[in-house]
Amino acid sequence: DPGVIDSRTIEFPNGRLVSRSIDDRIGAYVVLEAARRYAEKPGAARVVAVATTQEEIAAHGGGAGVCATCIGPQMAIVVDVTFAIDHPGLEKKEHGEAKIDGGPVLTRGSIISPVVFNLLRDTAEANSIPFSLQAAGRDTGTDADAIHIAREGVPTGLVSVPNRYMHSPNELISLEDLNRTAELIAQTCRKVTAKTDFTAR
């Protein structure tokens, strides 16, 4: 007989949320929340929010690659989750320094645009948003891998939410990390104008 684990969403009083499939439903939430905040006080940029499918199973990003090709963005910010290492069994050397309540995680690596990375980092610092860094020597395992090669190439950044117990029925995240990540993205979008130069120098 087939069976499934009965896993329900639980919000704890200390600002933690536990649920299955946080990877990467929470990314879709953060994108929509960032878009909502941006709409309340819009900047010059036209912001398009998408939620895509097949990131885990498609060789080149599935829906993300299609969206990037059709939309042709000036830049892209991908939102995903990453391993929180503040519990036994995960190595800082392998997964970086992401911690619950540590704020968003900014990825730096070969496919990440240094211009977009710097824009995200500078915005976080200017708005006193705590963050940590993660290195990606090759691909990132996220939709950024497909988006950055769409069309003539899309300058792409990656922002992740720390996620404890990823790929389990009881993934755990911080609501404050969600708030900080959405705020970082909204504030970053406000800094983009038609004159923003995304050429890596």
Image (spheres, rainbow, N blue to C red):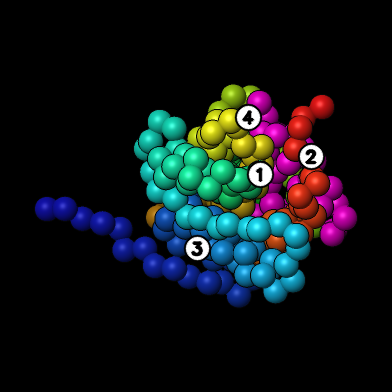
Q: Position of residue 147 (x, y in %)?
A: 54, 38
Query: Residue 114 is drawn in which quadrant?
Result: top right
Q: Earlier in the sequence, mark 1 or mark 2?
A: 1
Q: Position of residue 33 (x, y in %)?
A: 60, 66
CA gap between label 3 and label 1 equals 35 Å
CA gap between label 3 and label 2 equals 40 Å
Q: Amino acid at mark 2?
A: Asp
Discs 4, 1 touching: Cβ within 8 Å = no
Front residue of 67 and 187: 67
Q: Amino acid at mark 1?
A: Gln
Segment tinted magenta in the rendering: 100-128
Front residue of 162 and 3: 162
Nearest to viewer (mark 2 / mark 4) = 2
Q: Position of residue 200 (x, y in %)?
A: 77, 30
Q: Amino acid at mark 3?
A: Val
Nearest to viewer (mark 3 / mark 2) = 2
Q: Amino acid at mark 4?
A: Ile
- Quick check: is 103 in the magenta stretch? yes
Which residue corresponds to mark 3? Answer: 18
Discs 2, 4 touching: Cβ within 8 Å = no
Query: Residue 189 is drawn in which quadrant?
Result: bottom right
**Residue sitting at x 66%, y 26%:** 110
Residue 111 image label: 4
Which residue corresponds to mark 1? Answer: 74
**Residue sitting at x 56%, y 43%:** 72
Q: Earlier in the sequence, mark 3 or mark 4?
A: 3
Discs 3, 2 touching: Cβ within 8 Å = no
Discs 3, 4 touching: Cβ within 8 Å = no
Discs 1, 2 touching: Cβ within 8 Å = no
Which residue corresponds to mark 2? Answer: 197
| Residue 118 in view (yes/no) | yes
